[in-house]
Amino acid sequence: MGRYVLRRLLQMIPVFIGTTFLIFVMVHALGDPVNALFGDKAPDPAVAAQIRAQYNLNDPLWLQYVKYMGNLFRWDFGTTFSGQSVTSLLATAYPATLQLTAVAFTIEVVFGIGFGLISGLRRGGVADNSVLILTLVVISIPTFVTGYVLQYLIGVKWGIVPATAGDPLTLQSLLLPGIVLASVSLAYVARLTRTTVAENSKADYVRTATAKGLPRRRVVINHLLRNSLIPVVTFLGTDLGALMGGALVTERIFNIHGVGFYLYQGIVRQNSNTVVGFVTILVIVFLAANLLVDLLYAVLDPRIRYA
Amino acid sequence: MPDQERYKKSDPLAEAGTGEEEMPSAVESRTFDLGTMEGQSLIKAERLADHPEAPAADDRVVARSLWQDAWRDLRRNPIFIISGLLIIFLVVMALWPGLFTSTDPLKCDLSKSQQGAESGHPFGFDTQGCDVYSRTVHGARASITVGVCATAGAALTGTVLGGLAGFYGGWLDSVVSRIADIFFGIPILLGGLVFLSVIPSQSIWIVVAFIVVLGWPQLARIARGAVITAKQQDYVTAARALGAGNARLMLRHILPNAVAPIIVVATIALGTYISLEATLSFLGVGLKPPTVSWGIDISSAADTFRNAPHMLLYPAGALSLTVLAFIMLGDAVRDALDPKLR
Amino acid sequence: MPVATRVRWAVIAATSVALVATGCSSSSSSSSGSNANGVVLAWWGDPQNPLEPVNTNEVNGGAVLNMIFTGLVSYDPKTSKASNAMADSITSTDQQNWTVKLKPGWKFSDGTTVTASSYVDAWNYGALVTNKQVNASFFQYVQGYNDVAPATGAPTAQTMSGLKVVDDNTFTVALSQKFSTWPQTLGYSAYYPVPKSFFTDHAAYLNKPIGNGPYEIQTWTKSQKMQLRPFTGYSGPNKPKNGGIDLKVYTDTNAAYADLQSGNLDLDNGIPNSALKTIQTDLNGRYINEPAGIIQTISFPLYQPQWSTPGAAMVRQGISMAIDRATITKVVFTNTRTPATDWTSPVLGESGGYKSGLCGSVCNYDPAKAKQLIQQGGGIPGGQLTISYNADGPHKEWVDAVCNSINNATGDTKSCVGRPVGTFADFRNQITTKQMTGAFRTGWQMDYPLIQDFLQPVYTTGASSNDSHYTSAQFDSLVSQANANPDQAAAVGQFQTAEKLLINDLPAIPLWYQNGTAGWSSRITNVALDPFSVPVYSEITVK
């Protein structure tokens, strides 16, 4: 187990380098960011050249990357074009996104698995079909539509919860963006849970447990659910990172100054420092979540062992 | 003992020739019939009712493959028939939109902006004054192409890579999983912007390719997890002990047992991919006019739903219907492939 | 079942982490700070560059600078007329060498006095190329600019030879060419003075800029919020009538509008297009829609051979006549734009150079004539017109509408399509590196209310915003004659003669004049927008 974890940690290094380099190349591929700083005016060539030099934009790409990584190891993520240090952006953005993700993830886990369990146990029933319709609607309507509609109806028209999350973030104000963010993943989790539960409900051990006269509650939770969770946990693990980085649209709609918003701004302003800095942290979260998932396999299924 | 017969036919292991695993499993199927009625759906009940005569008709002659069995099952499944018809309908609409409307989706009259239905224009007009009905019909092609092709591409890539990684483990697993990790790290907007601005083509295949590139890691993770679970099962160990080769193990024993979660995720993914195309349009990097797609229309209707809900309703409804059809199809296929549910 | 217990624990733990993570902050959120002492909570966008006077060229940074600085001259919010603010007088005998006298006794909000060297040092700093100020080119007419900002290589001087401090309240400026309306340009933010601390502790200054205007910055949480309070030592006439302004950064204009409707925001001047249809009823008429000094145009790449022929000019005229401006401004923009009939803006006023109908029939909608002109000119080059725009801005709707209008005129649904470019940066790159092959959107927001600003930077040969790379010797010479003309009315006439050349050459099709819009809550009154579409913050009163 220890060796396995160590190996996985070592494997993170190439992934880390690969991702950051890829992002670096991609931001670079978008072209020169300097012109945009001058708005609708053509840049003064001399000033533009100075700015390019400041951000090492004249160097070949690999050298820019090496310089960037060199700074990174001194915990210097560079600055944005507006002169803010990226580390200070990270410090304000990640806590906000973490709170949003926590709310969304909780909704996803509780309702996703709950709905999935109900519809898996009563396949074809009213509950099952209701969940099908619900998940369907949620999947097929893009988040920006659900976001705008819910914001207007619940936030503005009925005034049940605040229309935007604002500052500081409260649980109440994060409820709406949390639901919007969780919605699509929730559908996945529900469908996935339904399938595996339906499958496992016919398994030997479930029947054995039922035959032993165990209470149904216990059979369902301890035996059925636990064994049905492996694909669900896989999904949840990969989804955790996606929630954090994918909140781009949700954060924009609900005015949350989190990772998605700064990433969006960084991308639109083509500031590689911001983009790479944020993605770097995101990748670390992804990798940690994936490792956790793989370790959870062993917890959920004793037959899986890591050498 | 009709139950036992059926089991024999469908379980891959029966084909592999082991007798030992049969007994407990046979017991399993019987208790299924007797014990857990509460867990059965109406569909299952119908299917069981159909079955008793089936084995008598064509059993034992040829050991039919799992896939043949599944097909036989599917033909009798009303869900499959309904969803199949729906999909055929949508595909016809995508291929020959002219059968359904003669109005040009690009012919727009701004003075009719956001007006409701009128004769000849049953769904009303959008902001630009284009006919919503015509655009909904014509939008099917791009949206279904994106959804189906992207799902097929992502599912195929993901299943192959994730499946191999899960099956062989070791360095292959590490390499594939880590590559998937790298792709997971790319923010979709950044990827979209780069992809769609560096490649100046207006083709929808660019969008498809982009979704495949970003979508396969998710399916690969699922496939890998499912294969890891399946490969630990007794019947796989047994088949291996009997000398089954890797290819045979994977295709005949593991794949059918691991395919369920992949189908579930893929059919949902199909829906999300179509709406992802809408999100890309919303962010300004998706399909471009003069292409007509549900995604483009949904994204332009998103913030006008207060004034003109019909602009959102019809393309979003068409999208929902498509997703429903594919999810139902996926469910039916999945059930048919699962011997345990017979 | 120990394992199951563990799993259950994990779920419980995750849930409680979520609750704790969000719960902690909920207790400390009772005061939002907006309701205290007549403070106005207003919409804001994150400024793109550091807040230095010469480094700010967009409206968000400009709004703050406008509050915390007062320049030599200022513009009347209603009439756009320039009048001396901090300047006592700006005089010249030859339209080239200027003497600026300051009103004495003005203070920066850090207590130091504003002197002639506050201006001269600020301007020298702004022009010096190594300071990388985006608006450095505003000093290009000052003598010695080429020494501090040579096109290539290191600067050979640190200060511009044209600037001289005479005494504490007087300095002189020598320009490199005659420029009769130069004093009226000095209200622009690039010409603001800075205090000594700007140079002694630059980093601290950037965290909390200090100026000589009606407001001072109390706190600034970057990318989130800025609190401005009245500066008690302010010497100008426009003293704030409210307890201060809190600017809140919004990620999206729709989010701000949702907050405005639910009463969590007092002033929103970033109204999204989609809200315009319902805004009157949503806000009970608390909505303003006033002309601003912004004109939207479609430019053509005249550097491409297929667009530089005489036939292409005829095609451009045809395209212009194919655009139904009246319907588009009404339907798509809900009357927040006015169809353009010249290349300036109504905020200049007739005496300032705006002339309604100057463009003539070329800017009138006439689909039949349009089709005929396009055919006569040899058809649209390449068979299809593309109109490029940056997809990160709100342009898709109107570009599609313009294309549909053109398509309807030509009778071919494929003769015009919009071409989105992902980011503004990429869009600008394609323009400045001459990669455009079809038409593209261009907009011009005036720096100062002069007809000169609408023509010289945009249409003279090699000018900084001449995106179509239009070149006409006649146009250039008329503009320099007008600049040298000390008689204001005659100068305006010369500018208009130059402007008329654009009708035939049509490097850019005028579309519409953009209005400034703002909505506000029932808490505040007396909201107005200046000709730069920035709210007149100091006049707002809180109930």
Image: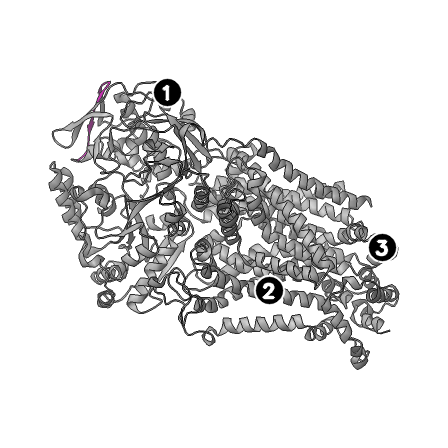
Amino acid on which disc 1 is placed: Asp
Residue most extreme to the bottom: B57
Left or right of C397 in this view: A202: right
| Residue B319 in magenta stretch | no
Q: How many marks?
A: 3
| Residue B296 position in % (x across, y down) | 46, 59
| Residue C392 position in % (x across, y down) | 42, 49
| Residue C172 in magenta stretch | yes
| Residue B7 position in % (x across, y down) | 81, 70
Q: Nearer the viewer, mark 2 or mark 1?
A: 2
Q: Nearer the viewer, mark 1 or mark 3?
A: 3
Task: Evaluate if marks 2 and 3 touch, with contact meaning CB atoms under 8 Å apart.
Answer: no
Binning the other alpha carbons within 10 Å of mark 3 as few (below 14), some (14 to 19) or many (20 upward) gives some
Location of residue C238 by image quarter: top left
**For mark 1, what is the residue?**
C110
Q: Residue B324 bears which disc, if any? A: 2
